[in-house]
Amino acid sequence: MRACEPLTGSVGVPGDKSISHRAAILSSVAEGVGRIEGFLQADDCLRTADALRALGVYIDPLGADVIEVHGEGLDDLHAPDRPLELGNSGTGMRLLMGLVAGREFATTFTGDESLSRRPMDRIARPLEQMGARVEGRGERCMPPVTVHGGHLRGIEYHSPMASAQVKSAVLLAGLSAEGRTTVVEPAASRDHTERMLAAMGADIEVDGLAVTLRPGRPLQARSMRVPGDFSSAAFLLVAALLVEGSHITTGEVLLNPTRTGLLTALQAMGADIGIAGRHEEAGESVGDVSARAGALSAAEVGGDLIPRMIDEVPLLAVAATQAGGTTVIRDAGELRVKESDRLAAMAQVLGAMGGQVAEREDGLEITGATPLRGATIDSRHDHRVAMSAAVAGLIAEGETVIEGAECIETSFPGFPAALRGLGAECIEEEE
Ligand code: S3P
C-alpha cells in the first residue's frame, strides 16, 4: 500500500457475512429449498456450508455467489463422521454449537490457531443449562470443543455480554428445546437471527432487549438476496474519508441499525456521509452509502453504540488518528476476544505507523491529527486488523506492507481489487 491519489467511483461489496452464515444454517433446518443469492463466497461462510454438509444437508453451489440449500427439518441432521473444521470462523462455530445441542449425537468442532484461542464458555454455559454437555480445552472451554447433544429444555438466559453469537446459539438450541427460550442482552447486538427466524415462520417475539422463541413451528425455506456487507464497505468508506479529495459510493449495502454504529460515530466526528436509495430486502434495510473526504474531529464513543459497531472499532481507531483532539473509545473489552486482541493489535499497529494511541483496559485513546508513516505490519491472522492497516497505509508516507494479508479472504475477497478500482495502489504478493 502507498499513499494515493483521491479515491473516486462506485463500488459494490460482497454479501454480508453474518447474514450468509444464518441463511445457510437456518435454511438447512427449514423445510424446502432455499435459494440464497449473494452468499458470501469467503472462507468463513464456506466452512459453515461444509460443516452443514457433514451434518447431512445437501447444499448445491450454483454459481459465483448462489447456493441452494435443501433442508429437511431439524430432525434430519445426523452425526458427522468427522470433526467440523471451522477455520477462522467464530460465528460458524458458535452458531453451529447451538444448532446441534438438541440433537442426540456428539459433534466435535475444530478451528485454526486464532479460533483455537477463543473462549467457547460463553456458549457452553447456556447450552449446559439447557441440558447439553460441552467439553473444551481449559477453563474457558477453547476449541477443539465437543457438544454432546440431547434433550433440551427452554431457559431464560441473561447474557453477560451483548453478543449476537451467544444470542443466536441459544435461540438455535431453543428450536429443539421443550418450552420457550428467552435471551436477554445487556445492550442490543445485531438482530439478523431474529429477523430471519421470523421471516421463516418461527414463533419469535422481541420485547426490548429480550427475545423469546417458542419452538414447534417448522421453519419454511425462503429464497433471498444477501445485501452487501456493511462491515466490508466500511473500510472503503473510511479510506475515502481520509484520502484527500476522495468521494466514493458503496452500493446495495446492509443498513440494519444494529450494524451501522460506525456511521453514527463518524457523523459525530463531522464526517460527510450520505445515504440514498434506502429500501427493504428480505426483512433487512439496504441502500447506497457515500463518503466524501474532509476534516474530522475527535469524539467519545462507548456504551450501547459499541455493539452496533463491534467489528468497526479497529477502523474507527484509524480514522481517529486523523481527527483533531483525543478520541476516547470505551466499553470495548469484547475486542480482546475477537480473531486477535484487537485493542492491543490496533495500539501496536497504529503506534508503529506514528499514531498516538494509548491502550486502556476496555478501549483506546487516540490523539490526532498525526501524520502516519508506512511500516511492515503483522496481520495477526485477523482480517479486520489487516484491512484497517491497509486503510492506514493509504494515508501513510512511504510503503506499508501487510504480512499475512491472506486472512482478508475470510470476509472480503476482492478487497485489494476494490481498492484498486477506486484508484489506490495495492499490490498482492505471494508469501
Ligand atoms: C457476529 C457477531 C459479532 C461479530 C462477528 C459476527 C455474528 O460477534 O463480532 O464478527 O454474525 O453474529 P459477537 O456477537 O460475539 O460480538
Image (spheres, rainbow, N blue to C red):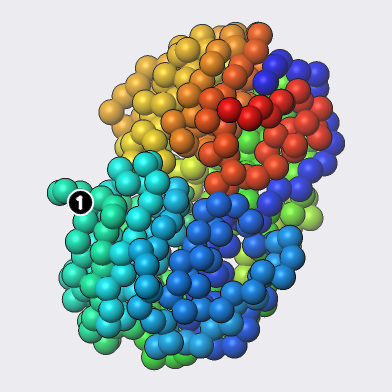
- Residue 190 in percent (x, y) is at 48, 57
Identify which residue is drawn at 67% across, 69% down.
61
Identify which residue is drawn at 35% across, 21% down.
359
- Residue 414 in percent (x, y) is at 70, 42
Find residue 130 and report its image quarter: bottom left
Identify which residue is drawn at 19% across, 76% down.
131
Q: Which residue is mark 1?
A: 137
Identify which residue is drawn at 39% across, 81% down.
78
Q: Is residue 39 left or right of residue 250?
A: left
Amino acid type, residue under disc 1 in the picture: Arg
Under tag 1, what secondary structure? strand
Find residue 45 and report its image quarter: bottom right
Q: Is residue 120 left or right of residue 319?
A: left
**Residue 339 visible in the picture:** yes
- Residue 280 in percent (x, y) is at 69, 66
- Pick the quarter of the image with the C terminus: top right
